[in-house]
Image (cartoon, rainbow, N blue to C red):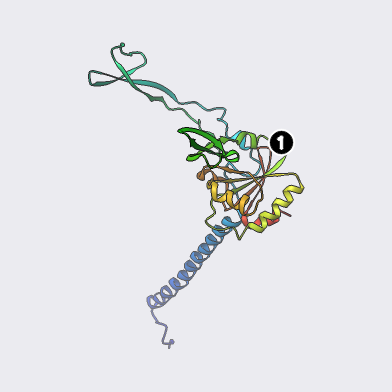
Amino acid sequence: HYPAFFHHSGAGTRCCTSGIEPVFGSFILILSISATLVATVYLQAHVLEHLPTVDCLPYKKGNDLLQLRQMPEDAIPDVFDYNFVYKKEGVTKEFNTANLPDSTWEFVERKQVLVKKGKNNVPKINDFSLKLDSYIYTYEKDGTPSDFEANDLPDSTWKFVDKKTVSADSTQSILGQSGEYYLFFLKTMKDGTEKWSTGFADLLQKAKEQNRKIYIITSEKEPVEDFFNKTNQYNVPVYTCDMTAIKTAARSTPTLFLMHGPVVQDKWGWADIEKAAK
């Protein structure tokens, strides 16, 4: 006689076996999914602190950023033509360059028209510009307005009228310099400074000892300027850059680049800034 949990027939035995296998298979499947999930979460957290292990972006170590801002050698530019809009007696009409109207028509506007799409005509780095913002203040006295710079404001007899931002593109002058320097990318101040402020202070000291400049790159000029140069009086230049470009260049907040001229020598996420300062 067979034990109670076996069936004599082959069909019964197969039935028991088929009932056991899916349990084992399900366990392996759940274990595999769990391991994948844990690995994914770990890698995401690691990237946010230490940067990706494999960097495939244009800002990776060894790349010349100025060179990658240039148009590719085999680029074929887009071909454009222009249409001109004129009006006469309430009628508006477009004309091409070969068929312009006579002087009885009044010019309205010019429109650019794409004739032929080019190919490979976008640089690998096309939105990375480092701009130094300054402010021009307009004051008025006796009905006459005048502009002043921040370090040369008028006395209280003048009435404040307006404040304008003036941006100068400094990309070429910064990346084109010789020697080593740092780019410190800080997308935003919303996450606070506690996790990296000590590391930055150490880095600044090291940079001074090695005669390396540090440039702060951000999309939020005023709060970043306040933290570095008013609250802490680090006296470091703060440059603005497009948020999307910073997100591409800096995968953690903040991210530090060691540059030699236009070439990326090394990179660190915020968790490794103290290592970079040693």
Foreground of the two, 35 or 214: 214
Q: Locate the N terminus by quadrant.
A: bottom left
Which residue is depicted at the point 41% across and 73% down? Answer: 18
Q: How many marks?
A: 1
Foreground of the two, 175 or 155: 155
Which residue is depicted at the point 56% across and 41% down? Answer: 155
The residue most toward the top is: 102
Residue type pointed to by label 1: Ser
Give the side of residue 79 with respect to residue 219, left or right.
left
- In the rendered view, would you say 83 is above or below 17? above
Which residue is depicted at the point 46% across and 27% down? Answer: 118
Residue 83 location in percent, x, y? 35, 21
What residue is disc 1 on? 178
Residue 190 location in percent, x, y? 52, 56
Residue 71 location in percent, x, y? 55, 30
Foreground of the two, 14 or 208: 208
The residue most toward the bottom is: 1
- In the rendered view, would you say 17 is above or below 124? below
Give the side of residue 33 with respect to residue 178, left or right.
left
Foreground of the two, 193 or 64: 193
Residue 11 location in percent, x, y? 37, 75
Q: Locate the C terminus by quadrant.
A: bottom right
Numbered disc 1: secondary structure: loop
